[in-house]
Image: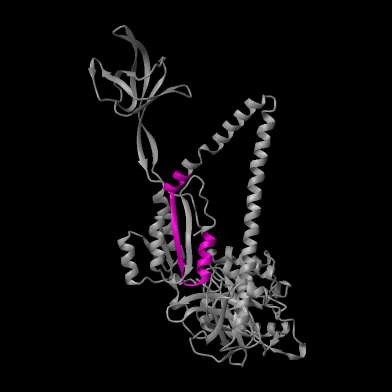
Amino acid sequence: MKVRWSRVKEDHDKPIRDAQRRPPADPSLLVRRPPVVTIMGHVDHGKTTLLDGLRKSQITASEFGGITQHIGAFLVRLPSGESITFLDTPGHAAFSSIRARGANATDIIVLVVAADDGVMNQTVECIQLAHSADVPVIVAVNKMDRPQADPQRVKQELASHGVLCEEFGGDVQAVHISALKGDNLPALAEAVVALAEVLELKAEASGPAEGLVIESRTDKGKGPVTTTLVQRGALKKGCVLVAGNSWAKVRLLLDENGHTVKEAGPSTAVQVIGWKELPSAGETFIEVESEQRARQVVCYRAEVEAQEKRAESLQEVEHQQQIHRDLYLSQRAELSHLSWRRRKAELYRANKKLFANRPSERVERKTLSLPLIIKGDVDGSVETLLNVLSGYDAQHQCLMEVVHFGVGDVSENDVNMAHAFGGSVYGFNVGVAPSVRRLAEKNNVPLRLHSIIYKLMEQLRAELSERLPPRRVQSVVGEAAVLAVFHVSQGKKKIPVAGCRVLKGQLDRRLTFRLIRGQDVVWEGSLVALKHHKDEVQCVQTGSECGLSVHGDVDFLSGDVFVCLEEREEPQVTAWDPGF
């Protein structure tokens, strides 16, 4: 049942219409909680293999292309009885927004650096994220089992980026490990536990739950599902949660292995089932007292968001009005010396010229456009794709438009929308039902499905290139020097004829010719006649002499050079580089 905004405004029993986080609790009520640790680093430096070794599982075996492509949350129980919640983030350059979300949700960052590779681009980015989020770092120097391993070089490179290890006089712990062989992993876990004790991490273990939506997706059997990190309170079955403009009554809580749990306390990551709509990854969730209260909060937030959009639209309209006003005033100032009647006519012509080309520009851009439907398995994947596509510059190229995007498998609505706009459907880690695939084939809608992000971007770049018109390229076939100029009578008119010698290549009468005098192009066009001695010929080879006449009134001079050009079409390649 939908709640009207008027009802929310008239609800005076609730002094706060929006749900807000509770104030800090009495310190005596706080209990110790496990640390939340984010594994970060460059791609292929062994982040997921490290988690694999810590929890004795095979995470890497299920990854596409050997890279993690969204956040994974895992609870690792150590032999000592301690627990650590690990967040595994992607290392690829495209997933910077997901890494930033992981850095803001964590207590400690374990920065994985390969001993044989050193500090790379994404390593530097992770360091910057840690500094901006003010999160302490532990360095895991991985792949120490390789012969090219040089941990000292790694620490020196880290020092140049503001990460000083203990042996360099800093306070950052550095642990030498081999994630593949499992060497020294207990020492890394002990370093995390020791740092957590220094940080004195505590939270309320009871009361309303609050936390962060780490990832969100749509499951066929379960509906909207989120991976959530509880930061305070106790999350239980039956709780009513609000996150962004969505709310949920928790029907089921699952751990990372898919097992049902009754309750999730602070620093615990669980999957929440029961959302009415899919919230965005990165949203904070808050428990409220009832479903009615949740509806009121969501309705209030939707109205506030609509008001903000209206204000932005009004600001843009005012900006455009000011531009046109300034243009009119500048034109009037330039024509102030004219009479009123002439000034009015000049302004009319100027405005007509200003807006005359807009329809034709729209038609041209429409023919060179690629409408896209983007579907992803989780909200973070869609966010990553949109971030990459936002860097596309359509100037002088094909216009790329994201018509629709969403989470979940490709649906009939996606295919119909792509058919209406003449676009393509790009899916990342999603499936397609047989009926949807048949509909796409019937409507000639391309389905571009990929499980590796850089493969998806390669195909998108290729499709953009296919939409570009072919480029006309000219190549020199032959050159001839003008030796003398003759005039041949044709009726009452005398036609100039250039007597030439072919210096290289050949002259072909069917091709385009260019007359060059010094460094300047004097004429370009086609020939009227090409003769060898007295015979009309099609081609003249190197070393031969010939006479030629051209279309147009052209004066030849001795020493001019005729260049014979062959034109052909070549496919264009888009200049856009998505960074893969």
> Which residue ends up furthest to the top in the rendered image?
492
Q: In the rendered image, which quarter contains the N terminus?
A: bottom right
In this picture, residue 541 sits left or right of residue 475: left
Q: Nearer the viewer, residue 133 or 369?
A: 369
In this picture, residue 220 sits left or right of residue 188: left
Residue at 30% x, 62% y: name it: 442
Residue 139 appears in view: no
Q: Position of residue 19 (x, y in %)?
A: 67, 77
Residue at 63% x, 47% y: name it: 320
Q: Based on the displayed image, in which of its 4 quarters is residue 193 positioned?
A: bottom right
Residue at 40% x, 60% y: name it: 418
Q: Nearer the viewer, residue 63 or 177?
A: 63
Q: Position of residue 189 (x, y in %)?
A: 61, 84
Q: What is the magenta range? A: 362-388
Compared to 493, does 257 lie above or below?
Answer: below
Q: Position of residue 183 (x, y in %)?
A: 55, 82
